[in-house]
Amino acid sequence: MVTRPASPVMGLSLKPGKKLRLRFDIWNLGTIVIAVLASVPIVTVIAMAVIPNAAVGDIWRHLISTVLFNYTVTTLGLMLGVGAGTLVIGTGTAWLVTMCRFPGRRIFEWALLLPMAVPAYVIAYIYTDTLEYSGPVQSILRSWFGWSSGADYWFPEIRSLSGAVAMMTLVLYPYVYLLSRVAFLEQSVCALEAGRTLGRGPWRNFFQVALPLARPAIVIGVTLVLMETLNDFGTVDYFAVSTFTAGIFDVWLNMNSPSGAAGLASVLLMFVLVLIILERHARRGQRFHHTTGTYKALPGHRLSRGRGVMASMACALPVLLGFVLPGAVLVKYALIHYQLTLDAEYAIYTLNSLTLSVLAAVVAVTIGAFMAYGLRLSGTPVMKALTRVASLGYAVPGAVLAIGVMIPTAWLDNLVDGVMTETFGISTGLLLSGTIVALVIAYVVRFLALSLGTVEASLAKITPNMDGAARTLGHGPFSVFKRIHLPIMRGSILTAGILVFVDCMKELPMTVILRPFNFHTLATFVHEYASDELLAEASLAALTIVAAGILPVIILSLTITRSRPGYYFIAEAKP
């Protein structure tokens, strides 16, 4: 029996009596290099936390005796509150718009995603300006009821842990809504009809049939929400909520201790690790399968007039509080104070944000496409593991990544400067740290998972037979990728670039730490002005960030609406 070598298109070689092994071509070697470089920031933070150091020991003793317990309790409380709030709102509204029929449902299908375009720190600034003692809400209440001071009445304090929970819940629930709705749309009608024939009403069917089938997607959505909660800096800093992220900035900037900040960052990494383990454990040994491949239009349960109004209000409230009211306030301020924003070098800050975001999007999409195609060529467990390592940055809070990028780039700058000074008498100064290069590196490491996942999903839809046919015509891997895959994946690549671009426009913690001296983006400009109680002067910049986030919301809405198997067939079959 003759053993035929595997096709070169798969990037593997097979010898008689030997197992499949990885070929070290440009695709595999490139993936290895990228994975190693992407893991450097995380490894740096862990190393600095565990390497014995007298200064670190002093910082740790101080933190343990003063604020570490408070950081832990507050961070856990914030995660618990935001996780519970987004779970209820996201899952409940997803079920209503997918399975029920009530006034405004078609609008709410996409409108419920709109709060995703608003950064948490922007909505925190707006509601603080609206609800604080000197704001319009309390001023009107005092005028109506004749109260003369705050001692005459009670009003909830917006700058508190509960306030931070509310702000983050309003803008993060779309993560759970998005994944829950996709899961509900992909469910077979047969399973739901079986539940109805067994005497289960709509709500029992939801809890006993649909919810268990959608549980893996819901768990992933809540996990993403909690990771974004750990990443937040603008909201907790503005509300003076002592979380680990706020502590990292305090130790880094106020105590001037990168090592101590790395120690806190390592503890925050443990939170992320626990989240990942819990998410995996929640799905361990559990499989939820559809027992039929038959799909048809979902049987919408038409609600009575009273329940329909309640459903409309339940869906309208998150959109109203999370997007409409903040957007209206920003538009009002922008129309009145736009000249102040323009005078504050708004154009320069916009150009800075666009430059950084475009550079990061181009680099991230290029690397993501390279790794995804390399994985397609090889497909070995080693390559799969390397791509997952390269994607870890999205699970790491921005403040942690910023420290992990700052330290090795500063070390490399000092090394190059020392060599050039001793050899040629020339000081090179800062080539990476303290420049936009470090920012772009941090952005790419954090958001590479977005581009890689999008391109990988698109590549998976292209049959390998097309690769084989092209190879038989004499085209190499690069030629196949350029002539066949790129034209087919053009839409997905554009989507990946837009997603990375928008996240970079909103990114705050990494930008605050890594930006060059006297360098502002729209995010840092809004944060600085809002912290000085000058939100109106920065409203146009905040509105620009929100406007940039609306485009991916539209794309996501169209994508999930068409995600149901047989969507086009069902649509064409409708009278």
Image (spheres, rainbow, N blue to C red):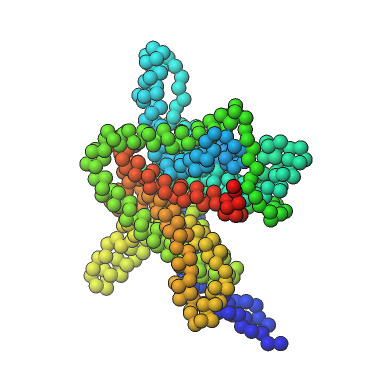
Q: How many marks?
A: 0
Residue at 42 percent across and 46 percent down: it is 550
> Residue 154: x, y in percent?
46, 19
> Residue 300: x, y in percent?
63, 40
- Residue 350 vs 358, above or below: the answer is above
Residue at 38 percent across and 43 percent down: it is 546
If the image is split into quadrants, where does the N terminus sit?
A: bottom right
Q: Which sits in the foreground, 483 or 345?
A: 483
Q: Which sits in the foreground, 209 or 388?
A: 209
Q: In which quarter of the view is residue 235 placed?
A: top left
- Residue 531 vs 481, above or below: the answer is above
Residue 44 visible to an observer of this rendering? no
- Residue 367 vs 323, above or below: the answer is below
Residue at the extreme bottom of the image, as rendered: 2
Residue at the extreme front of the image, as rendered: 575
Left or right, 427 with respect to 166, comes to: left
Residue at 23 percent across and 70 percent down: it is 425
> Residue 77: x, y in percent?
54, 37
Residue at the extreme right of the image, as rendered: 198
Left or right, 42 with respect to 548, comes to: right
Residue 568 visible to an observer of this rendering? yes
Residue at 64 percent across and 37 percent down: it is 301
Q: In which quarter of the view is residue 4 placed?
A: bottom right
Left or right, 316 with respect to 409, comes to: right
> Residue 302: x, y in percent?
63, 35
Q: Which sits in the foreground, 455 or 156?
A: 455
